[in-house]
Image (cartoon, grey):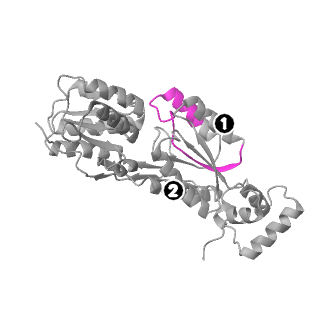
Amino acid sequence: MMKVTIKDIADACDVSKATVSRFINGSGYVSKDVADRLAGKIEELNYVPSATARSLSTKKSNVIGVIIPEVSNPFFAEIFKGISEIADKHDLNIFYCDTDNDGKKELKALNMLRSHEICGIILTPATGGLIDHEYNSDFVNAVKSLNVPVVLLDRDIEYVDWDGVFIDNFKGAYDSTQLLIKNGHKDIAIITGNRDLLIGQERFKGYMTAMYESDLTLHQEFIIEGDFTTETAYTKTINLLKLDKRPTAIFTSNNLTTLGVLKAFTEQGIRIPEDIAIVGFDDIAVLQLLNICLTVVHRDTVDMGRKAMELLIDNMKDSNMNKQRSGKKIIIEPEIIIRGSERLIKE
């Protein structure tokens, strides 16, 4: 038998989930008519309130905040699926914010959440993860002012001890570059991410370490400064293809960067891997539907969302029991999925 949730009760009575929550928790006004309907439906459906949700916050809130930097990025859409899956099981509602990787929007979102009685927050910093102590301090203070448990997702921050779920970015980039080297490539380009972000630094270091350990020449023109966006990757790839000596392979630092590179390759008639090999960080499901088989650094993004939500729930329980906890970091090992785009075809 399927577990009955607050959403089921709300749908059956044609009211909002917030109204059902107020009725169950006695945390706000509900009219007598609505209360009678809710009581009857709860008894009819044999609804059992989640002990977790009811005990998570002294404010009697069952709302969590989720702040991500790119709603248009499929990576975060998949993560949100995992967060929602676990939140629904615990009858938790989600207040969702998109910062568009903008620091001002990020601070505005944090300040806005302060006015809502959230019981916890999951966030992927837009610029709070920058290697910039002055801004980092503003960001950290804004998060701390919420006075709720915090879980970081994907992007870590220096000098804080918050829980978080992350990928081993260094290993993902290192293993990708080593794979290209083992396939005979020597002239390997990289389009980096934003190297002011820790994840950008870590992926760049993974590439550099693999190149150094193999005693390969680092051509400065093959080290291309990107920013994790499709537009920048496209422009920089067009310029790369104009060089007299092209690389035989390229490592792309995230899924949006890969899309920009592929757009440039398509326009210029570049074949993969016959003309240039490629390995990208993060899978792009739609490419397989188009029969474009790329070797990638894979991580289960839906499961990352699940783990972040589960970690936040544990954090909130401990917070209510006044336990002291140190930051728990869940580091996910990347997996290289080989599909053939890493091969060296021509010398």
Observer-nearest of 154 and 242: 242
Observer-nearest of 167 and 30: 30
**According to the image, label 1 marks what residue?**
111
**According to the image, label 2 marks what residue?**
82
Residue 283 bears which disc, if any?
none
Q: Is residue 327 above or below residue 212?
A: below
**Under tag 1, what secondary structure?**
helix
Q: Residues within 10 Å of mark 2 (few under 14, many from 20)?
A: many
* Magenta span: 116-141
Q: Residue at x 74, y 55 (%)?
A: 18
Q: Residue at x 41, y 55 (%)?
A: 300
Please say whether residue 27 is one of the residues in the magenta stretch: no
Nearer to us: label 2 or label 1 = 2
In this picture, residue 291 sits left or right of residue 154:
left
Q: Position of residue 195 (x, y in %)?
A: 38, 31
Q: Position of residue 152 (x, y in %)?
A: 51, 46
Q: Is residue 307 above or below residue 12?
A: above
Q: Is residue 61 above or below residue 196?
A: below
When asked about the image quadrant of residue 88, the answer is: bottom right
In this picture, residue 156 sits left or right of residue 245:
right
